[in-house]
Amino acid sequence: MSLHKEPLWVAAFDGGKARVFENIGPRTAPDLALRAEFEIDNPPDRDQVSDAPGRLADGAGRGGQAGLPKGVAVGASSVEHADAHDLAETEFVSDFIRHLNAEAEAERFGELIILAAPHALGVARPVMEPALSGRIIAQEPKDVVRESNSVIAERVGAILFPD
């Protein structure tokens, strides 16, 4: 009798691509079948934003005012704009985790191993619902989403049965 809940899924993702696998082999020799793949077209920020950062007036404004202490700078400060590329990656990871939340809630898998780029894993954790987080048996902060199925399967085998 197995103590494991089947099926075992593996989610590999970063900020722009996600792949979900199901282990169709024994856990001692994982054989991963691709169930789903998600990807976004997310060009660099410089290709998405055309405006220069905005500016805000400091203190009394550009003209200055009488009564300010000597040496007080009066002018305009640059306002940092949001990085459209980073925002798109964060939204992609959040949407992917919401998808996994729904799959867990529907009980489509028993256990899950997550292999994700460190930043993507940090974005993902707060979005995980209890139905999903309760099924996660391992998380590895490693970006392997663009690796071959066999390389990912080897990594899963090492996680399940470390030397």
Image (cartoon, grey):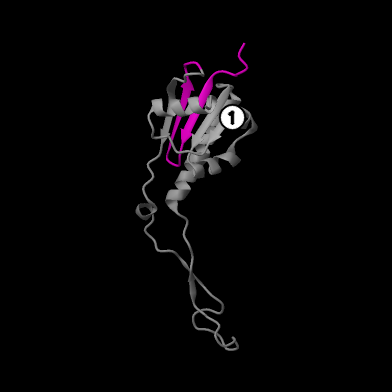
Report the front residue among 102 and 23.
Answer: 23
Q: Residues within 10 Å of mark 1 (few under 14, many from 20)?
A: some
Inspect this view and state whether residue 103 appears: no
* Residue at x-position 53% and y-position 84%: 64
The image position of residue 134, as x and y in percent, is: 63, 29
The image position of residue 129, as x and y in percent, is: 62, 34
* Residue at x-position 45% and y-position 54%: 83
* Residue at x-position 37% and y-position 52%: 48
The image position of residue 157, as x and y in percent, is: 49, 24
User: Quick check: is 8 in the magenta stretch?
Assistant: yes
Q: Amino acid at mark 1?
A: Ile
Q: Can you say whether 110 is above or below 52 in the image?
A: above
In this rendering, the count of numbered labels is 1
Inspect this view and state whether residue 24 appears: yes
The image position of residue 52, as x and y in percent, is: 40, 63
Report which quarter residue 130 is drawn in. Answer: top right
User: Quick check: is 114 in the magenta stretch?
Assistant: no
Q: Can you say whether 10 is above or below 64 in the image?
A: above
* Residue at x-position 40% and y-position 39%: 40
- The residue that disc 1 covers is 136
Name the outermost residue toward the left. 47
SS label for mark 1: strand
Name the outermost residue toward the top. 1
Report which quarter residue 53 is drawn in. Answer: bottom left
Q: From the image, which quarter does the N terminus lie in?
A: top right
Report the front residue among 63 and 7.
Answer: 7
Report the front residue among 42 and 31.
Answer: 31
Name the outermost residue toward the front. 163
Report the front residue among 135 and 92.
Answer: 135
Report which quarter residue 133 is drawn in. Answer: top right
Q: Which residues are magenta?
A: 1-26
